[in-house]
Image (cartoon, rainbow, N blue to C red):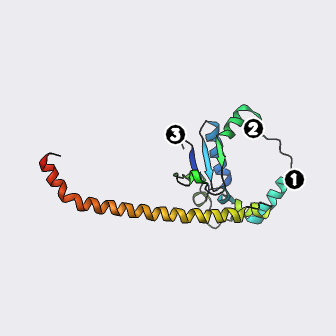
Amino acid sequence: MATFSSTPIVIDGKGHLLGRLASIIAKQILSGQKIVVVRCEEINISGSFFRNKLRYHNFLHKRHIVNPKKSARGAAALERLKLFEGVPPPYDRKKRMVVPEALRVLRLKPGRKYCTVKRLSHEVGWGYKDVVDRLEEKRKIKAQAFHERKIAAIKLRQKAVSDASPSFGKLAECGY
């Protein structure tokens, strides 16, 4: 993510560690980059589920003074960030990136415990887990159908090129 782009970068949150991804995204949006994160419910948190559930309940009982949107710079940065559960329609056809510095498989030792934001949120009151799962299944079916059509079109094009290759020699002789 070293280069700056005027178009928003779409990041697939699945399989990333929460804190590492958050720090990288914060640095980018403060520098002016627009970022969209999809599938936020699949972001991983290191540590066991029970430990994270206790930490979250402890967090709910505290007062929170840090509010980045109170400064103009923080408010502008938050305007450049969009977070989505699942992959909504404008972003389901765009290339989704990953951040290698934040991937769980690269940063967490094998055998270490982790949980997902989806499970943790569902346990503390988030009621849309089933809705997001159902919409994701629909999206995956549509994506599979699109992929099959794309592969069929590529094979058809390759067949057409191979069938027309003998006539290319004749056209070249004629000066085309």
Residue drawn at 65 percent across, 60 percent down: 42
Q: Quadrant of residue 41?
A: bottom right
Residue at 69% across, 63% down: 131
Rendering coords of residue 95 (x, y %): 51, 52
Q: Which mark is residue 61?
A: 1
Distance between the alpha carbons at the discs numbered 1 and 2 = 22 Å
Task: Determine if residue 47 is in view.
Answer: no
What residue is drawn where x is 31% and y is 61%?
Answer: 158
CA gap, disc 3 and disc 2: 25 Å
Label 2 SS? helix
Q: Amino acid at mark 1?
A: His
Q: Is residue 69 above or below residue 49?
A: above
**Given this view, does label 3 or label 2 mark the residue nearer the observer?**
2
Report helix, strand or loop for mark 3.
loop
Q: Going from the N terminus, do you reach mark 3 or mark 2 first?
A: 3
Judging by the rendered image, the residue that carries numbered circle 3 is 3
Which one is nearer the viewer's eye here, 36 or 32? 36
Q: Quadrant of the N terminus?
A: top right
Tell me if mark 2 has few (under 14), some (14-19) or many (20+) residues whose alpha carbon lies within 10 angstroms of its own.
Answer: few
Q: Is residue 174 left or right of residue 138?
A: left
Q: CA distance from mark 3 to mark 1?
A: 40 Å
Q: Which of the numbered marks, if any, corresponds to residue 69? A: 2
- Say whether disc 1 or disc 2 marks the residue closer to the N-terminus: 1
In the image, residue 151 sits, relative to residue 73, either above or below, namely below
Using the image, tell me which numbered label, if any, was put on residue 85.
none
Q: Secondary structure at mark 1?
A: loop
Amino acid type of the residue tagged 2 in the rendering: Lys
